[in-house]
């Protein structure tokens, strides 16, 4: 199976300036995604590792770190409203024009950096063993579910998402749920092209710890990640 690793890194960031390349414990944030991806390539588990970006600054740094940057994203898919499927299909189409074909795309977002190499290896092996269209990473959540969720109602009132919210249902009785954490997406190219979607209706699961599921979108997230990593 030929797998293309795509690491997306836009230049613009509203929450944290230069978020994708900000220094974390002496390394730019994007390196925490590039390094394990390159190790997967060295092991023969993926075919190519690219960074999809719209800026020369990120492109030059990514090349120095060993990733390929075969193009800069066009403006039409470079803004904050662009969807992930847009730059993924752009990368697929770029290589198809060169007669280079892939079976699947592994999306590694720099903002979800806590992925161990063993986890990524297990991810690819699981995907290869199962004939499914997609795989996502999740963490197991024992407390959060629709029994404790509400939406805005009239005035200052809340409307429960579950009618049993006040019936004293115990945690042991409602069961666990799995929450998508954004760290790993692995999808067949055929499914991406046919549906324009990254996640199928019944994706495979690769489970991660909740403590690994930091998604760096705010300065608070950044500080949590630094405290966990910089020792």
Image (spheres, rainbow, N blue to C red):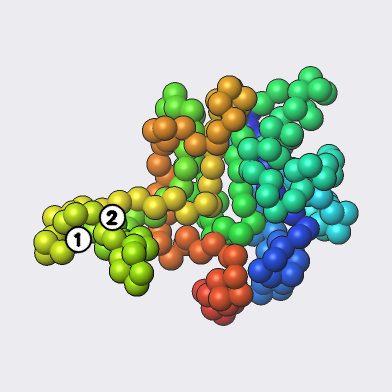
Residue drawn at (59%, 65%), measured in percent from left and top?
A: 217
Crowdedness of circle 2 by 10 Å Cα count: few (<14), some, many (20+)?
A: some
Work out whether residue 82 or residue 112 is closer to the camera in this orientation and state it: 82
Residue drawn at (15%, 64%), measured in percent from left and top?
A: 166
> Residue 147's image quarter?
bottom left
* Residue ID for mark 1: 165
Q: CA distance from mark 1 to mark 2?
A: 8 Å
Return the residue found at the far front: 155
Whether residue 34 is visible here, answered yes or no, is no
Question: In terms of secondary structure, where does tag 1 sit?
Answer: loop
Q: Is residue 98 above or below residue 230?
A: above
Crowdedness of circle 1 by 10 Å Cα count: few (<14), some, many (20+)?
A: some
x and y percentages locating residue 146 in the rendered image? 28, 55
Q: How many marks?
A: 2
- Residues at discs 1 and 2 in contact (Cβ within 8 Å): yes
Q: Quadrant of the C terminus?
A: bottom right
Return the residue found at the far top: 99
Q: Quadrant of the N terminus?
A: top right
Residue drawn at (34%, 64%), measured in percent from left and top?
A: 154
The label shown at residue 36 is none
Q: Is residue 228 left or right of residue 86?
A: left
Whether residue 14 is visible here, answered yes or no, is yes
Residue drawn at (68%, 38%), measured in percent from left and top?
A: 86
Q: Is residue 224 left or right of residue 102?
A: left
* Residue ID for mark 2: 161
x and y percentages locating residue 159 in the rendered image? 29, 60
> Residue 222's image quarter?
bottom right
Question: In terms of secondary structure, where does tag 2 sit?
Answer: loop
x and y percentages locating residue 131 in the rendered image? 44, 24
């Amino acid at each position: 199976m030929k797998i293309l690793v795509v690491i997306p890194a836009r230049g613009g960031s509203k929450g944290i300036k230069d978020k994708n390349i900000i220094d974390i414990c002496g390394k730019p944030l994007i390196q925490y995604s590039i390094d394990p991806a390159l190790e997967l390539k060295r092991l023969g588990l993926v075919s190519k590792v690219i960074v999809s970006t719209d800026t020369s600054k990120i492109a030059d740094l990514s090349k120095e770190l060993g990733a390929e940057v075969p193009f800069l994203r066009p403006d039409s898919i470079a803004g904050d409203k662009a969807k992930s499927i847009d730059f993924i299909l752009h990368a697929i189409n770029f290589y198809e024009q060169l007669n280079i074909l892939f079976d699947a795309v592994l999306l590694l977002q720099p903002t979800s950096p806590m992925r161990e190499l063993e986890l990524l290896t297990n991810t690819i092996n699981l995907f290869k063993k199962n004939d499914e269209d997609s795989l996502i990473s999740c963490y197991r959540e024992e407390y959060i579910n629709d029994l404790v969720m509400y939406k805005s109602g009239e005035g200052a009132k809340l409307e429960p998402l579950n009618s049993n919210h006040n019936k004293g249902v115990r945690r042991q009785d409602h069961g666990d749920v799995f929450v998508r954490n954004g760290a790993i997406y692995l999808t067949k190219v055929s499914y991406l092209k046919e549906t324009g979607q990254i996640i199928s209706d019944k994706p495979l699961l690769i489970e991660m710890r909740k403590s690994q599921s930091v998604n760096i979108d705010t300065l608070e997230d950044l500080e949590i990640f630094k405290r966990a990593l910089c020792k």
